[in-house]
């Protein structure tokens, strides 16, 4: 186990952990707007860590740049789609819920 | 260790399929189907098939998912929500279960038959690769050894587009056009569209020596066109029938022209002369890429219940 | 069991799930999803069997599956256009012989 392999393993496991945390946020957050936060921020950071782990193993500089380009494009795309989901949710007047409110309380408060 | 990874991937794949088939809400079924497509793309990598992985991720999960979501968005909620009859009481459930189990038993028996291939078709494919004009075996198969199949496949795509055009709705149907007039989308498009075109042409060019090729490049191009359309840029090209039809037949006609030219210069249809094999393959691939992108995009547009402008009934 | 035959069995299971969904559902779009799952299962069986028989990647079935994926998406698009036509004509998303079951 060389130092590079140890670094790669740490980066990969941390990246996967960030993905798990992002999915946990998707399941546990109460409304659409906060779920978008969890998905875009945590998942992109996890992807960045995984890309860094892959770059450590690559021979050519061009391939490393391509991997970084994948990360940059995914960040752009998720920022754009996160904004679009939030914009559409705002258009549909989806409620902003607190963690302990249920559906009935919110809909009655917004009547 | 590899077996465990394969088993885990297959278990996730089968769970996605089960959730997709057994879920009552249509939107959930479609989302699980898209996830199934993505898991399948990873499984194709495990099967040493990177071209199929690219095509499955782009076409199977991407374009098919877009078409399904588009169809689902146009149905009113009573057709997409859960139905209340419990599943196990219906006789149809048991009939479907028996049919699926018998299919699986028959297929398992068929898969268990030992394959004894007397010839190895991989040998001549690799040996003739230098004469085929490209370095990637799958591109060589698709556009040189079995180019007639690819020609017919493009013809099938054109045929589907023509049928979709002839079945379009007319004015008495409510017009539904999924545009998102969002300024951030317009601004990001100035960044995304050139990059998508560049990626598409790169996939096309790299298909000669690495996994890539016309179909993957065509689907990335279709994604670029669909994004352009979703942002609300309704150019006359989308709506005018003549432009639509020209885009569809462009790839097929270039393919046919090269084939007919080889009838005169070569010895058979689509038998490229040896020194022009690479050039003619790239020529055909370029036209086919543009056409596939345009056909997939117009299949998305034509399912919108929009009546096309400048339709002259006496000209058809 | 060889390493690649397991993917053929996964394809068999996908075919079974697809057949079940196709017969059980009466909603036309769900039937179309099940049909797509069935065709993906067939592709898995094909490439899994071919990969099992040879030690190096077998390119001919991969090209066949590539063609198959594109034709499947074309058929799906056509089926969706037809389903929308049917919905526009009859305001139903099931065929007439299935409507009394709902």
Image (cartoon, coloured by chain):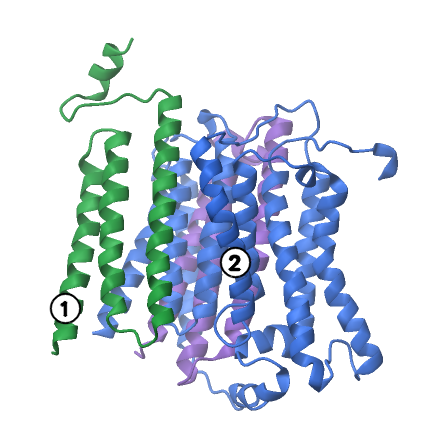
Residue A92 visible, this orientation: yes
With B297 as the anchor, is A15 left or right in this view? left
For the point 42% across and 78% down, the residue is: C51
Residue C83: % across, % down: 59, 38
The quarter of the rendered structure image containing the C terminus of chain B is top right
Observer-nearest residue: B146 or B7? B146
C39 vs A84, left or right, is right
Tally of numbered tags: 2
Instruction: In the picture, one chain is blue; tell me its letter.
Output: B
* Vertical position of residue B117 compared to residue A14: above or below: below
Q: Which mark is residue B196?
A: none
Chain of the residue under label 1: A
In the rendered image, residue C98, in percent from the top left (x then y), is placed at 53, 35
Residue B301's place in the image compared with B141, above or below, is above
Residue holding disc 1: A7
Please indicate whether residue C31 sits to the left or right of residue B29 in the image. right
Q: What is the quadrant of residue B39 in the picture?
A: bottom left
Question: Which quarter of the picture shows residue C15?
Answer: bottom left
Give the image location of residue B269, x and y in percent: 77, 76
Q: Secondary structure at mark 1?
A: helix
Circle 2: element type: helix
Residue at mark 2: chain: B
Question: Which chain is the one coloured purple?
Answer: C
Q: Residue at x 27, y 30 (%)?
A: A33
The residue labelled by disc 2 is B198
Question: According to the colouring, which chain is green?
Answer: A
Please name the residue shown 42% across and 43% down the image: B30
Residue B289 in the image: state x and y as whole percent. 61, 60
């Amino acid at each position: 186990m060389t130092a590079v392999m140890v670094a790669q393993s740490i980066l990969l496991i941390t990246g996967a952990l960030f993905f798990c945390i992002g999915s946990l946020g998707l399941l546990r957050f109460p409304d659409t707007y906060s779920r978008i936060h969890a998905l875009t921020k945590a998942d992109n950071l996890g992807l960045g860590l995984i890309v860094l782990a892959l770059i450590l193993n690559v021979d050519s500089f061009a391939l490393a740049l391509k991997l970084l380009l994948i990360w940059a494009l995914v960040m752009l795309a998720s920022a754009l789609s996160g904004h679009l989901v939030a914009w559409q949710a705002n258009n549909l007047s989806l409620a902003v819920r607190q963690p302990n409110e249920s559906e009935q309380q919110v809909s009655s408060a917004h009547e | 260790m590899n077996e465990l990874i394969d088993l885990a991937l297959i278990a996730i794949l089968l769970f996605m399929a089960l959730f997709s088939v057994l879920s009552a809400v249509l939107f959930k079924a479609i989302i699980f189907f898209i996830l199934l497509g993505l898991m399948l793309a990873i499984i194709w990598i495990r099967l040493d098939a990177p071209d199929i992985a690219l095509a499955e991720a782009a076409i199977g999960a991407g374009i098919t998912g877009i078409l399904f979501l588009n169809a689902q968005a146009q149905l009113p909620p009573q057709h997409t929500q859960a139905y209340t009859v419990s599943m196990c009481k219906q006789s149809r459930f048991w009939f479907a279960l028996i049919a699926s189990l018998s299919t699986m038993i028959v297929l398992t028996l068929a898969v268990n038959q030992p394959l004894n291939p007397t010839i190895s078709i991989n040998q001549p494919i690799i040996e003739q690769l230098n004469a085929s004009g490209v370095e990637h075996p799958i591109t060589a198969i698709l556009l040189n050894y079995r180019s007639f199949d690819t020609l017919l496949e493009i013809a099938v795509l054109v045929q589907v587009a023509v049928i979709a055009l002839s079945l379009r709705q007319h004015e008495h149907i409510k017009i539904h056009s999924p545009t998102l007039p969002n300024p951030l989308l317009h601004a990001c498009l100035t960044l995304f569209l050139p990059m998508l075109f560049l990626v598409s042409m790169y996939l096309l060019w790299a298909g000669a020596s690495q996994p890539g090729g016309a179909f993957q490049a065509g689907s990335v191009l279709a994604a670029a066109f669909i994004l352009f359309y979703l942002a609300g840029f309704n150019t006359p090209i989308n709506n005018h029938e003549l432009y639509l039809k020209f885009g569809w037949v462009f790839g097929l006609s270039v393919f046919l022209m090269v084939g007919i030219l080889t009838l005169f210069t070569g010895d058979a249809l689509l038998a490229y002369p040896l020194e022009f094999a690479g050039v003619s393959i790239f020529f055909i691939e370029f036209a086919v890429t543009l056409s596939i992108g345009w056909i997939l995009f117009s299949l998305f547009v034509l399912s919108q219940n929009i009546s096309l402008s400048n339709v002259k009934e006496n000209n058809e | 069991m060889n390493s690649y035959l397991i993917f053929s069995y996964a394809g068999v299971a996908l075919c079974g799930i697809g057949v079940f969904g196709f017969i059980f559902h009466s909603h036309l779009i769900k039937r179309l999803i099940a049909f797509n799952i069935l065709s993906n299962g067939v592709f898995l069986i094909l490439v899994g069997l071919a990969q099992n028989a040879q030690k190096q990647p077998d390119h001919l079935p991969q090209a066949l599956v590539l063609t198959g994926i594109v034709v499947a998406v074309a058929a799906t698009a056509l089926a969706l256009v037809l389903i929308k036509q049917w919905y526009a004509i009859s305001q139903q998303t099931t065929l007439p012989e299935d409507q009394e079951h709902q």
